[in-house]
Image (tube, helix red, strand yellow):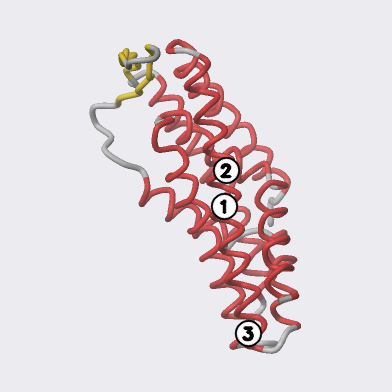
Amino acid sequence: MIPILTGLAAGGLHVFSGVDHLAALAPAAVENPANATRTGMFWGLGHGIGVSIVGGVGLVLRGLVDLEAWSAWAEFIVGFLLIGIGVWAIIRSRRIEVHGHRHEHTDAAHEHLHAHDPGDPSHHHAALGVGIFHGMAGGGHLFGVLPALALPTSQAIMYLLAYLVASVIAMGSFAYGVGQLATRSGTVWITRLMFGSGVLAVIVGVIWIVSTWPF
């Protein structure tokens, strides 16, 4: 039970404490508030899988693989990934069509906001892929993996699975919150939030590259 609780705590805290995680996911959540939770869960699933891959390699090849060296380079590349996501979000903010649908019910009428991009059916696979790469990068992820390396194999597996579950729940919750904020802010603010989250991702990406420069 202790490995499971530790994995849940480590996964949740790590996801919410990483500004790079939030900056990477916010643009997608703002773009399609209706599917924000699902997108966040896919991102969290990918992130948990990435961390589990690093942990699995560490368990199989303890002492033979320099995980720190690999993680340092991967973390550097994450900066460029964030910039790419930010540029994508800025471009998307100019293409998204936002409109409201009014729904009549017996007790009250209300309006739902929908964001549409004609050339974009889904980003779930992209969110999963970005999450996997992100989960395999960064020195902070090594701290999440270290407890698994110190545990017996069976307990290490439980720890990593709990870490993955926490990552899915945490990112799904964050994306849901961002999606609700976008929906309640009104039609004009959805595109503004999309643009702003893109700019934030670019800024974080630049800072990330400078702070992790390996040369």
Q: Name the spot of residue 112 as percent of width and height, x first.
A: 38, 19
State left or right for residue 28 relative to residue 96: right
Which of discs 1 and 3 lies nearer the camera? The answer is: 1
Return the residue found at the far front. Answer: 106
Rendering coords of residue 78 (x, y %): 57, 50
- C-alpha separation, residue under disc 1 versus residue under disc 3: 25 Å
User: Looking at the picture, how far across and down is residue 80, in whole percent?
Assistant: 54, 45
Q: Helix, strand, or loop for circle 1?
A: helix
What residue is shown at x 71% (from left), y 81% (from top)? Answer: 149
Amino acid type shown at disc 3: Leu
* Image quarter of residue 10: bottom right
Question: What is the secondary structure assignment of the residue under circle 3?
Answer: helix
Precedes in sequence: disc 1 or disc 3: 3
Q: Amino acid at mark 2?
A: Ser
- Distance from the alpha carbon under mark 2 to that under mark 1: 6 Å
Q: Write the residue at 50% across / 16% down.
A: 192
Q: Position of residue 24 (x, y in %)?
A: 54, 41
The residue at which mark 3 appears reads as 59
| Foreground residue among 173 and 152 | 173
Q: Circle 2 — which element?
A: helix
Q: Amino acid at mark 1?
A: Ile
Q: Residues within 10 Å of mark 1 (few under 14, many from 20)?
A: many
Quadrant of the drawing holding the C terminus: bottom right
Residue indicated by mark 2: 173
Q: From the viewer's perspective, is residue 4 above or below residue 98? A: below
Residue under label 1, please give it: 169
